[in-house]
């Protein structure tokens, strides 16, 4: 529960900082474009790429903000945005919790491959260029939910209900793990980030509880097989596997790049 509590604290803190004007000196804007400490620009790099493809113009301030965010996740935090920042994660986690409680977790009304998200990402970028329109950014459920929460709207409830129903009753974790083009972007960007989950085979009793809670089970292929860091960029660094492991066989680790390359 430790990392779950920490994640919720971070997610709600970000919403609070964006929502109240008294905190503008700390963080002002939204997840697409914001300013930190009244001076540091921050931009969603995936949104920025769409805007560049749509307009064929480069804004240097937005570019610098996109590079700052991109480098933070690509070099250090990996795909942590999906578990620690994105408000949709709260909805999908709750949907999965309800799904398990209702014992729907073994059934799927429809089944799609996780690689669908990469195709969606590709189509978003292609269509942004062809139609001169930032396709995902204009219709992003992430942006709609976050902006509505910031400005006190209620239409986000309708979007949240759709996401909840899809994940709870049709296909588990469909939105985040199969469809989301932003998640696909961060997965591709996070392969070589320093923050990893480290697995110790000698401590593991192979209860496989970690696989039961992981939203991206394919990244834990090494469980019961060998000592290994989770190298896949698809890991969202949520810490669920660490929280549930009673053997202390899983934990967060900052990797040594030189040692990692020697393996």
Image (cartoon, helix red, strand yellow):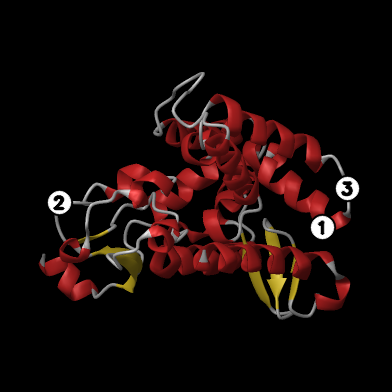
At 39% across and 28% down in the image, what residue appears? 113
SS of the residue under disc 3: loop
Q: Nearer the viewer, mark 3 or mark 2?
A: 2
Does residue 223 sit above or below 249 in this rendering? above
Viewer-closest of 116 and 126: 116
Viewer-closest of 145 and 94: 94
Tell me which corner region of the image, top left, top right, bottom left or bottom right, holds residue 260. bottom left
Q: CA distance from mark 3 to mark 2?
A: 49 Å
At 67% across and 41% down in the image, what residue appears? 140
Q: Mark 3 or 2 closer to N-term?
A: 3
Tell me which corner region of the image, top left, top right, bottom left or bottom right, holds residue 250. bottom left
Residue picked out by circle 3: 153
Identify the image quadrant of the C terminus.
Answer: bottom left
Q: Nearer the viewer, mark 1 or mark 2?
A: 2
Viewer-closest of 56 and 194: 194
SS of the residue under disc 2: loop
Q: Residues within 10 Å of mark 3 (few under 14, many from 20)?
A: few
Does residue 262 sit above or below 128 in this rendering? below
Q: Residues within 10 Å of mark 1 (few under 14, many from 20)?
A: some
Q: Residue furthest left?
A: 262
User: Where residue 146 sits: x, y (%)?
Assistant: 74, 52
Viewed as shown, does residue 255 lie left or right of 143? left
Viewed as shown, does residue 141 lie left or right of 248? right
At 82% across and 64% down in the image, what residue appears? 19
Residue picked out by circle 1: 150
Q: CA distance from mark 1 to mark 2?
A: 46 Å
Residue picked out by circle 2: 225
User: Where residue 184 sits: x, y (%)?
Assistant: 46, 44
Q: Kindly tell me whether residue 56 is visible in this rendering.
A: no
Viewed as shown, does residue 262 lie left or right of 235? left
């Amino acid at each position: 529960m430790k990392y779950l509590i920490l994640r919720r604290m971070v997610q709600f803190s970000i919403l609070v900082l964006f929502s109240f004007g008294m905190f503008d000196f700390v963080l002002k804007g939204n997840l697409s474009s914001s300013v930190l400490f009244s001076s540091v620009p921050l931009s969603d790099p995936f949104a920025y790429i769409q805007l560049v493809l749509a307009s064929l113009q480069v804004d240097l301030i937005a570019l610098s903000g996109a590079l700052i965010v991109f480098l933070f996740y690509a070099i250090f935090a990996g795909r942590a945005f999906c578990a620690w920042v994105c408000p949709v994660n709260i909805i999908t986690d709750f949907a999965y919790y309800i799904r398990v409680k209702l014992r729907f977790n073994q059934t799927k009304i429809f089944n799609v491959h996780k690689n669908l998200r990469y195709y969606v990402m590709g189509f978003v970028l292609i269509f942004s260029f062809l139609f001169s329109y930032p396709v995902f950014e204009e219709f992003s459920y992430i942006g709609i939910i976050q902006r509505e929460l910031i400005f006190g709207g209620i239409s986000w409830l309708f979007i949240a209900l759709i996401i909840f129903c899809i994940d709870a009753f049709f296909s588990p974790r469909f939105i985040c793990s199969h469809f989301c083009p932003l998640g696909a972007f961060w997965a591709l960007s996070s392969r070589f980030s320093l923050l990893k989950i480290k697995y110790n085979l000698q401590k593991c009793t192979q209860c496989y509880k970690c696989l039961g809670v992981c939203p991206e089970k394919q990244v834990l292929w090494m469980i019961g097989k060998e000592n290994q860091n989770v190298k896949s960029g698809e890991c969202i660094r949520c810490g669920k596997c660490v929280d549930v492991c009673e053997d202390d066989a899983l934990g967060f680790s900052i990797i040594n790049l030189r040692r990692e390359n020697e393996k």
